[in-house]
Amino acid sequence: MEDFEGRKTILELEDVSVTFPNGMRALKPSSLKFYRGEFAVLLGPSGSGKSTLLRCLNLLQEPTTGRVSSPWISGPASESSARGHRRRIGMVFRQHQLVLSMTALDNVMAGMAGSCGLFRAMFPSDAMRIEALECLDRVGLAGKAMNRASELSGGEQQRVGIARALAQKPDAILADEPVASLDPARASRLMGLFKKICGDSGITAVVSLHQVSLAREFADRIVGLRAGEIVFDAPASELDDSAVLEIYADSAALSGGGSGARRPPAAPHEAREREPAGTF
Ligand code: ADP
């Protein structure tokens, strides 16, 4: 799947919409292509449909209408086709979803279960351990491989989450608000590390964020969502203040300040972490 500029499509949504059983229309009919090697950000306020779109891309959410395609989906939708697709796509979650009682290394090896099978992931070979250690090394955490996840800071836990996705040797990584629990400085460092790793390995990334500044700093391309609708899709350099206002038009973040002035959200309203500044 190549477009006229020679870019290879790796994930595609064609008229995909999602309406939940309670009638909530989380995603209006949307068509999008993601290209090999790009670092794309889904930007929008909470509830705008970012997670739903990511879950559709990974076939965790069945679209109400439309079609998701990738080089690994062949023929009609089936569980084996979906498994093949998911094997090529790593996920990084908002709450990292590590097993806190397990070591960082064991959590990373759990990421290999999709490709090598659960049994082998439970009883890993030395080669698998070394591979997992290399993934931790790439996120700067080889020295904490034997620490339980519960002993790691929030930023370190999220880096283990990235290492776990890397252990899958994915073609693409979908990250759902991966820095939502970090303060701005750590969020920026983690995004920088994540982008470098993806760039070095040619991994396509689709990352949902609600922080405009991070999207501007790191995205190659920004897809803006508002109330389940794509209202912006362009290179990050084209995200001017009027585009931000369009994306956040219905958001409470725009009515702040008491002046009635409509301003783009300046900073994330995030929980702060316990570790000192200067670390992840
Ligand atoms: P975001 O990731 O941008 O915060 P989501 O994709 O999680 O947005 O949600 C989009 C909308 O769909 C929200 O209004 C949310 O409350 C709603 N929603 C999400 N999941 C469900 C569900 N399982 N059932 C009903 N509504 C849902």
Image (cartoon, helix red, strand yellow):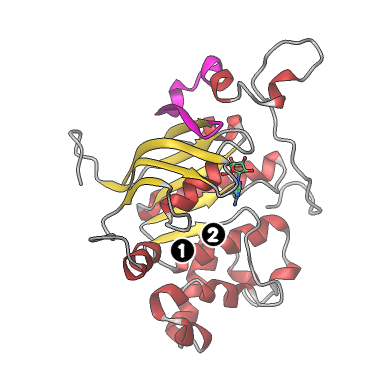
Q: Report if residue 35 is visible in the image.
A: yes
**What numbered label is drawn on residue 197?**
none
- How many numbered discs, if any? 2
Q: Label 1 neighbourhood size at 10 Å, few (<14), some (14-19), many (20+)?
A: many
Image location (x, y in percent) of residue 217: 53, 33
CB within 8 Å, label 2 to label 1:
yes
Could you say where residue 270 lies in the image, as x and y percent from the top left? 74, 41
- Identified at 37% across, 55% down, the residue is 201
Q: Does residue 194 lie above or below 218 as drawn?
A: below
Q: Which span of residues is magenta-colored?
A: 226-243
277 with respect to 236 (left or right): right
Secondary structure category for the residue under label 2: helix
Q: Nearer the viewer, residue 39 or 72?
A: 72
Query: Which quarter holds ligand 1?
Result: top right
- Where is 6 relative to 213, above or below? below
Magenta region includes residue 238: yes
Q: Is residue 152 above or below residue 105?
A: above
Q: Which numbered marker is on residue 166?
A: 1
Q: Is residue 263 left or right of residue 42?
A: right
- Asked if disc 2 is less than 8 Å from ligand 1, the answer is no
What residue is disc 2 on? 162
The image quarter in which residue 253 lies: top right
